[in-house]
Amino acid sequence: MSHYNSTVSLTQGQPCLIGFSIKWLVEESKILNEVSSTGYRPMPHHATGLKSFVGRCREDSEGKRRMNATKSERATPSLTHVALHVPVVAESIAFFEAYCGMRVTLDRPTSDGTGSVVWMAEPGRERELVVVLIPDGTARRQADNDYSHLGFAVGSREEVDALAERASGQGCLMWEPTDEAYPVGYYCGVRAPDGTCVEFSYGQPLGMGSDNHLE
């Protein structure tokens, strides 16, 4: 006997089919109610697949719940880039490559076609945080008591010393290697071509080796 038959045989030889049909109608009615609660409206000819359909509805509903929860968790803004308006983009690229190990990840022309806007990032972090270099800027003249800077972590005190020595030889060392109490650590400051101070540190509870410096 088909579930789609509009009539049910009441002959004495088929009581089990009547009972099955009634039980099926009750179960499918419950399923229809559950489907309705999800917001789905299946067509009548989908009736035989309702159980599997409800399963998909449940999965979709759970997926939407998780997606909404994730959106809620991400409601706080996250830092994605730092933009520097620099005099000569090529010089800044060379600096961040040589001192910071960064690489160009995007190079696009300016709206007037006279230059390029460049994105740079550490390998493996291209979709997390980038430095944006915008052309035709004015060089910064940072006062001695202005501690604005970009901060990079390195793997040892020796690396701080090596970077400071290189910067000193190139005439762009701003802060001699200095050792300060936690969480500042051991650091030096180097002047980028646009005048921005770039700090290299070891011993801070951030970035490379930070697990060794947590209190």
Image (cartoon, rainbow, N blue to C red):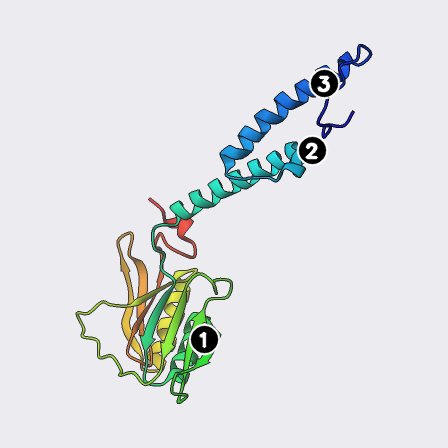
Residue corresponding to mark 3: 20
Residue under label 1, please give it: 97
Q: Residue furthest bottom?
A: 114
- Amino acid found under the numbered disc labelled 3: Phe
Quarter of the image where the N terminus is located = top right
Of the numbered discs in the image, which one, if any, rests on residue 48? Answer: 2
Which secondary structure lies at badge 2?
helix
- Residue type, mark 2 in image: Thr
Q: Earlier in the sequence, mark 2 or mark 1?
A: 2
Mark 3 or 1, which is nearer the eye? Answer: 3
- SS at mark 1? helix
Q: Residue 116, how many percent across, how many down? A: 42, 83
Cβ–Cβ under 8 Å for marks 3 and 1: no
Q: Nearer the viewer, residue 149 or 42?
A: 42
Which residue is at 35% across, 83% downward?
135
Note whether 156 is above or below 57 in the view shown: below
Q: What is the spatial separation of the Cα atoms under label 2 and label 1, in whole angstroms?
A: 64 Å
Residue in view at x 26 percent, y 53 percent: 181
Amino acid type indicated by mark 1: Glu
Using a 10 Å C-alpha cutoff, classify the residue at mark 3 as few (fewer than 14 neighbours), some (14 to 19) or many (20 or more). few
